[in-house]
Image: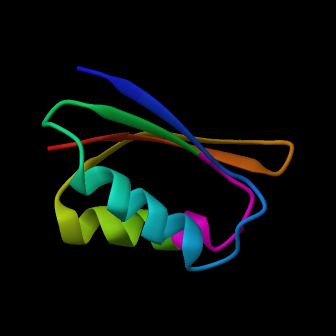
Amino acid sequence: MTETTMNLRGLKCPLPTLRVKKKLSSLKPGDLIVAECTDPLAAIDIPNLLRQTGDTLEGKTDTDGVQTFRIRKK
């Protein structure tokens, strides 16, 4: 299993979600993405994406305006 960190800071909706979706399609089951976003809408868009794909949101933190999502590929 691999862990990939994605710096999506400064990108506006829908780019963070689209890039996470593209990355998920290239991963193997069990791999992890750590996505760092500054777009406030990512808090809505990324969980909605994961409901569609069936992948798992293992955690979300918000520190100094940076939202960090830990996403596990199903």
The residue at the point 56 percent across, 79 percent down is 14
Place residue 48 in its image quadrant: bottom left
Q: In the rendered view, would you say 17 is above or below 69?
A: below
Looking at the picture, how far across and down is residue 74, in whole percent? 14, 44
Query: Dividing the picture into quarters, in which one does residue 31 lie?
Result: top left
Residue 34 shown left or right of residue 37 in the figure: left
Task: Tell whether position 11 is magenta.
Answer: no
Q: Position of residue 67 (x, y in %)?
A: 67, 49
Residue closest to the far front:
26
Q: Is residue 49 above or below residue 54?
A: below
Q: Is residue 10 left or right of residue 16?
A: right
39 part of magenta stretch? yes
Count of picture labels: 0
Residue at far top of view: 1
Residue in view at x 23 percent, y 56 percent? 25
Q: Position of residue 2 (x, y in %)?
A: 31, 22
Q: Residue at x 35, y 52 (%)?
A: 23
30 w.r.t. 12: above or below: above
Extent of the magenta region: 36-44
User: How are the colours assigned in the image?
Assistant: rainbow
Q: Residue furthest bottom?
A: 14
Q: Quadrant of the N terminus?
A: top left
Residue 9, position as x, y percentages in the image: 74, 54
Residue lying at 82% horizontally and 51% vertically, measured from the top left: 65
Above or below, 47 relative to 41: above
Left or right: 26 in relation to 32? left
